[in-house]
Amino acid sequence: MRDAYQVAKVRAAEAALIALVPDGTLMQRAAAGLASVCASLLRASPGGVYGSRVVVLAGTGDNGGDALYAAALLARRGAAVIAIQAGPRMHAGGAARLAAAGGRFAGVVPVRGPDDTRPDVSGRYDPGHDARHAIGHADLIIDGMLGIGGKGGLRDPYATLAQLAVNSTATTVAVDLPSGIDADTGAVDGPAVRADVTVTFGVVKPGLLIDPGARHAGVVELVDIGLRPHLLEAPDVSAPQRGDISALVPRPGPESDKYRRGVLGLLAGSSRFTGAALLAAGAAVHGGAGMVRLVTAPAAAAAVRHVWPEVVITELGTDGGDRSGEERDLPGTGGQPWSPGDVGRVQAWVAGPGMGVTQDAAQRLAAVLGTGLPVLVDADGLSLLAKRRDLLPRPAPTLLTPHAGELGRLLGAEPDDVEERRLEHARRAATMFGACVLLKGSTTVIAPPDGTDPVLVNTTGTSWLATAGTGDVLSGLAGALLAQGLLPPQAAATAAYLHGLAARLAAADASGVTHGRAGAAPIGASDVLRALPMAFRAV
């Protein structure tokens, strides 16, 4: 598990450690680790460390001090270092060390007035020729402007320096956190540094794992400075790794049968959206469920029977009742309202993919949520929930799997706001609905309902998943894991990890990586579905 801690906990651990070690020890440890990463990046470039052009964007605090001390170590190895003073002053000790190592310094043109510092007014400020020339010709840029205490969007001169770094061809290394990123949430309110590599100290910060901050962080390198023994509270965010997922994946034992392995009830598909039922059912089969019981419209039922003959199907009539044709009396026949008990024994339900948003669909969703079984709600089910918020919270375990638009409708928020503050909105929804919330997107965020456990973040996702039907695959997979006994946060994390991994494997296979050609190729939801067995084998 890769654990991340919010700023208050990091500060408390730093204070406890500082009281035990000589003054300046933590900064020297951080600088040594930062210099090591920078040197390795320069060694991988054609010119190496000696003679390379390194620019430091130095702020006023300890973050700038870390950068300056690290730059001094690079200068002693032959790098030509220029430190640009972004703020009104530099860290005195770091600047003196860099000067002694032969580093040079450049300032920026002071801002003239309030408009010069406004991030919403472009083209008002020019930091000067020295800064522009140094950044434009650099091989490596070290962002030491703001650290984990920074809040809000960057203002000039920081904003312009950050943009110059973005436009540069140099490799950009952020110190602890890219300037302009909220360390606790990953929110980006205006201009921010986009790093190729972020060297973070002590522990990972949540903003490095959650978009949009994660997109600005690049590759995250963790430098141990001795903080971990002094972190006395639980992490705020955790990113499960391969070993964590492997430990959660259910495996059948010698005494297993189809019922002990878990039976999933799947309320999915309609005459219009036959594919949703096909994809969700297939994912549930590949997800390890001992049996999948599908409730769907006749057209979807026919499609599923053709591809997944092992799925047990209950067909819905035009009146919403059951017309499965099974040789037994079912409460859903003869025009009676459909009931979850009509389909037989299940251990969990998935409701929503392609089921429609009609009054009958709303009745079926309410009936499923009225059971005492774990329920996953997705897609159309979430649209219905937005109109029937009285259906939640419920006593039994519940997992909601919205994308930003669906969560926005549930919360009455704009989708763009949800995207920009993913952690905040996922936590809010989990508390409001008493449910585990898996917020799909560039980084999947899983917020438990109680607000006490760490929020989980999945890191295997890929932009190739942004295609129709992949959400249906995720629903069926997560539902199968719920039916096998995993709690909603565990099922959500395991499903998201395997889902993302399957997409990566499918994209790589489609591009010919398995035949020796690098890259990735476009994929569809069916490709992800077919790659699920490979993903399971990989963990």
Image (cartoon, rainbow, N blue to C red):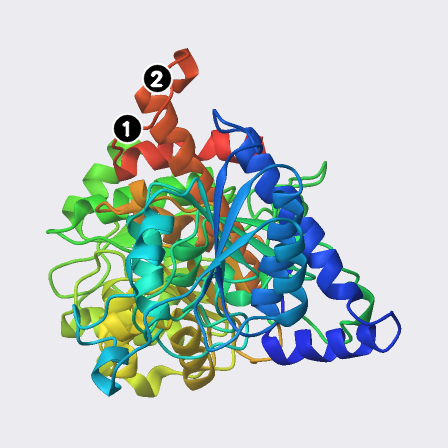
The quadrant in which the C terminus is found is: top right
Percent of width and height locating residue 339: 33, 69
Position above or below: 41 against 115: above
Percent coordinates x, y for residue 245 in the rendering = 61, 47
Quadrant of the frame with the N terminus: bottom right
Question: 190 or 512: which is nearer to us?
Answer: 190
Residue 55 seen by the camera: yes
Indicate the secondary structure of the residue bearing disc 1: loop
Closest to the observer: 161 or 130?
130
Q: Which residue is mark 1?
A: 521
Q: Give the residue at x 10% y 51%.
A: 272
Q: Is residue 446 left or right of residue 441?
A: right
Q: Which mark is residue 341?
A: none
Image quadrant in which you'd find residue 320: bottom left
Tell me if label 2 and label 1 are in contact, CB under 8 Å.
Answer: yes
Residue located 35% across and 46% down the image: 473
For residue 367, which quarter of the picture?
bottom left
Residue 20 drawn at (x, y percent): 89, 73
